[in-house]
Image: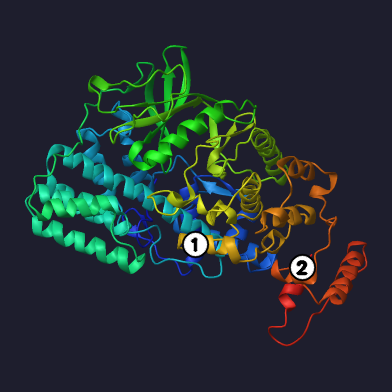
Amino acid sequence: MSSLKLYLLGPPRLERDGVPLEFDTRKITALIAYLALTGESHSRETLITLLWPELEPSRARAGLRRNLSVLKKALDGEWLVVERETIGTDLNAAFWSDVDQFQKLLGAWQTHGHPQADICPECLTALAEAVELYRGDFLEGFSLRDSPNFDDWQFFQTESLRQELASALERLVRGHTAQGTYQAAIPYTRRWLALDPLHEPAHRYLMSLYAWSDQRAAALRQYGECERVLEEELGVPPEGETTQLYKAIKEQQDLPPPGERLVAPSQARVLNDRYRLGAEIGRGGTGVVYRAHDTLLDRDVAVKVLSATALGSEGRARLMDEAQAAAKLNHPNIVGVYDAGEADPSASSGQVPSTSSRQVPSASSGRGSGGAAFFIVTELVEGESLHARRPEALEDILAITRQVCAALEHAHTHGMVHRDLKPENVIITADGTAKLTDFGLARPVASRITSEGAIVGTVFYLAPELALGKDFNGRADLYALGVMLYELTTGCLPFTADDPMAVISQHLYAPVVPPRARNAETPPVLDALIVDLLSKDPDDRPASATEVQHILGAPDILDKEATPAEELSTLKRIGRGRLVGREHELGEARALWNRALAGEGRALLVSGEPGIGKTRLVRER
């Protein structure tokens, strides 16, 4: 069997036994990348929608067949598994991809016997190999202009991998700093900073590294660069902490030694002499989630550890208040909160003492210095997130959404608003139960658009009133629910852009393209519900999650011929992308279609000047 190598970090390249394979169409490269990265079998319809959305079905299927034929011939029948209705990959084939190897190297810490937040010498070797593999962004320089769905998927993969790279670079910097090898840390810090030139903590770290390695002039220049970038891009000066560091370096003061440390691979971390942390199972903008064991009650739990630096003093107070409120929620579709507290991660021997774990401590106790870490203990749910396990059948999508509605209604009734509803926060168990997590523990809106790693998967679901800092209620969660439903039914988000501020602007001002315009199979009643959920004005959305749940359970929700109870005005139809001014022609076309379905042969010819909407007319259902 031959050996295949796929390079996707940077310009894409496929090699068979060391020989590059060339193809005369970019669709083949896109198909290979999608199949390799998802590692799953996909229906032909899914691949057609992804790669040939502009073609009518028969031509699209023919295009897929031609590309598969070329690819099978180039691979000599290996790696690709082509069935009558599905296409996938042979998991037993000799296949290597740089993305897969990159992620394996990032996860090597799991074999070192310590939490991911810690770094051991073995980690540094694996992390260095990982960042060396990252030759460039995912599919750099590659795009499919006629396939927006593929471009959306490529965008999300790119952003996700960039975040993983940033995390790896930061850990390399901290690891080399702990070893005192400052010169080795500097190139990694510069690369970390290049990913986000507005990230002030990286600027400060680079200034400190220059100072620790007796390069004070370079440290002062770095402050100037930080000042320039912030002024040009945001019109703001550096933070006080950055300015104080600059003054200390300029006055040739001795900087305090770095607080980073390396751990032995066997060193474990225990919170409160009670929660023994195991493998990392998730990572978000404010902290890391670990599988853990409650040694007091002898049960497995999940522990989310959040840094005090990321939270700030106000965030710590709000965290404790909301942890207490979230602990009162008791619903089968909500992940239960068991405990919360704060600890000092600098404690020796791997033990992390803190306040009593038998109750949620008061946030006004005066604790919470820079070295403190906060943790939330929750029910451990075995399953995958809705983001990782997206249902294909519309019936399954609606069943999950109804469960999410039940969870939201319970929370809203108890005065809790999630504020960070997204597929990553919905866990699907093996029996299909949906569990909503991170209730009330989301970060303030401002931090979502400024902190590293908090952008993707958050601003895309952000209600307009939250973006504006206005008063909000449970309808903010219903807006996010509408975004989720839109994404699940169409395969793409309603609002996307490279710049998070541009996404927020679309939430505030851009009319939503109805789901049916992107997926003609969307039933009209469901289409109308999603558009209502995405109303800019909260008062235009459904009144409650229960109301949404009832609509989703109505008999006509899957009826492709049913019409919504409320007809939209012409102005609203224009704003929402509905076809207007062609009612007569559309009626004639539908009448001919119905007669054809009844067995009477009919042909429909549509003619007219270019640009008057012929294609839009024939696509309308």
Residue 273 x/y as whole percent: 35, 16
Crowdedness of circle 1 by 10 Å Cα count: few (<14), some, many (20+)?
some
Question: How was this image coloured?
Answer: rainbow
Report the residue marked by disc 2: 620
On screen, 47 above or below 577? above
Residue at 75% x, 68% y: name it: 573
Residue 274 x/y as whole percent: 38, 16
Crowdedness of circle 2 by 10 Å Cα count: few (<14), some, many (20+)?
some
> Is the C terminus in the top left, top right, bottom left or bottom right quadrant?
bottom right
> Is the N terminus in the top left, top right, bottom left or bottom right quadrant?
top left
Q: Amino acid at mark 1?
A: Ile
Residue 307 x/y as whole percent: 35, 36
Front-most of residues 198 and 492: 198
How many numbered badges does the structure rendering display?
A: 2
Report the residue marked by disc 1: 28
Front-most of residues 428 and 31: 428
Cα distance, mark 2 to mark 1? 30 Å
Residue at 89% x, 74% y: name it: 588
Q: Amino acid at mark 2?
A: Glu
Residue 389 appearing in the image: yes
Residue at 64% x, 47% y: name it: 481
Q: Is residue 620 left or right of residue 266?
A: right
Q: Is residue 385 left or right of residue 375?
A: right
Which element type, helix, strand or loop, lies under badge 2? Answer: loop
Front-most of residues 413 and 25: 413
- The answer to which image quadrant residue 171 occupies is top left
On screen, 519 above or below 167? below
Front-most of residues 77 and 396: 396
